[in-house]
Amino acid sequence: MSKLLNVSASPHVRSKETTQSIMADVCIAMLPAAAFGVFQFGFHALLVLIVTVAACVLSEYVFQKLLKLPLTVSDLSAAVTGMILALNMPANIPLWIPALGGIFAIIVVKQLYGGIGQNFMNPALAGRCFLLISFAGKMSDFTMDGWSGATPLAQLKAGEAVDVAAMFIGKIPGTIGEVSVIALLVGGIYLAVKKVISLRIPVTYILTVAVFAFIFGKQDMNYVMAHICGGGLVFGAFFMATDYVTSPITPKGQIVFGVLLGILTGLFRIFGGSAEGVSYAIIICNLLVPLIERFTLPTAFGKEGKKL
């Protein structure tokens, strides 16, 4: 009897990983960058983190409660959205602005499209772009005690010299979570080791930006490294471009996605009016994911085989 074939319903391949465990890993991976941001910019940066995460979680809870939908705040996806959005904020921003961005991200971009797994673009980035358009002055003001308001990429675009070592460590003005490349790499490595993300998108994205900056910017390694270390590129590459819902699932598609991200970021930075470009590049490429997957989906075994 023990040798009888057991037939069960799909799925036949199961994993111990859950949405909650994956989101918990993403939160843990962002802690080094968050801790460094709070250490560098002070108590108000911590308040921005707390308020933004709370706004996202409460928005999801209230929306689902009012519409009598299943409650999903325990899966931590709203908390991840809040952390990503908060780490993309200037440390001195009034608290109501990131809270508004969190409400927009959760209700308009996530819940109105069906909740987790149904959104067509990264909710946190959509919230940030909404705030950039609505409150451009506040979102680009990085002036604090002891810090100038100009980011290294803004200085680079103006033709000024920048300190790449300071950018790598994080002793520069910028958003709460983007400044320390070291802290971001620690989190990115954690996600890769835990197999939460593949390195295809981050590595392809960063390398493409480097090549684009070298060809169309300056043939100078300090210039290229400044583009890699600045403007939230590392943060975007590891924590936003790798979002499961809004990035390709095929290996070839992920490489194409990374190349497109790098080209768009380079175009925005070098030829556009802004020194940044990561957020808009990711959102535009999010919209292209269905097309990318259509042309990179592998052919099923035994289907449309080539004749010899």
Image (spheres, rainbow, N blue to C red):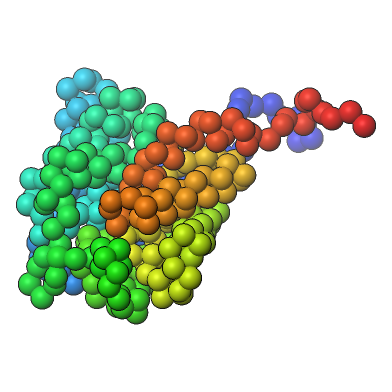
Camera sees residue 92: yes
Q: Position of residue 268 (x, y in %)?
A: 36, 50
Is residue 272 placed above or below 288 in the rendered structure? below
Relative horizontal placement of residue 114, taking residue 40 as reference (left or right)? right
Q: Position of residue 140 (x, y in %)?
A: 17, 55
Q: Position of residue 202 (x, y in %)?
A: 48, 56
Is residue 150 placed above or below 245 in the rendered structure? below
Q: Residue at x 37, y 52 (%)?
A: 271
User: Based on the displayed image, in which of its 4 quarters is residue 115 positioned?
Assistant: top left
Q: Which one is nearer the viewer's eye here, 256 or 162?
A: 162
Q: Residue at x 82, y 28 (%)?
A: 305
Is residue 285 placed above or below 10 in the rendered structure? below
Relative horizontal placement of residue 146, taking residue 20 as reference (left or right)? left
Is residue 171 placed above or below 279 in the rendered structure? below
Q: Which one is nearer the viewer's eye here, 1 or 221?
A: 221
Furthest-right residue in this view: 308
User: Based on the displayed image, in which of its 4 quarters is residue 233 positioned?
Assistant: bottom left
Number of callouts:
0
Q: Residue at x 23, y 26 (%)?
A: 64
Camera sees residue 98: no
Q: Residue at x 47, y 50 (%)?
A: 263
Which image quarter holds the N terminus?
top right
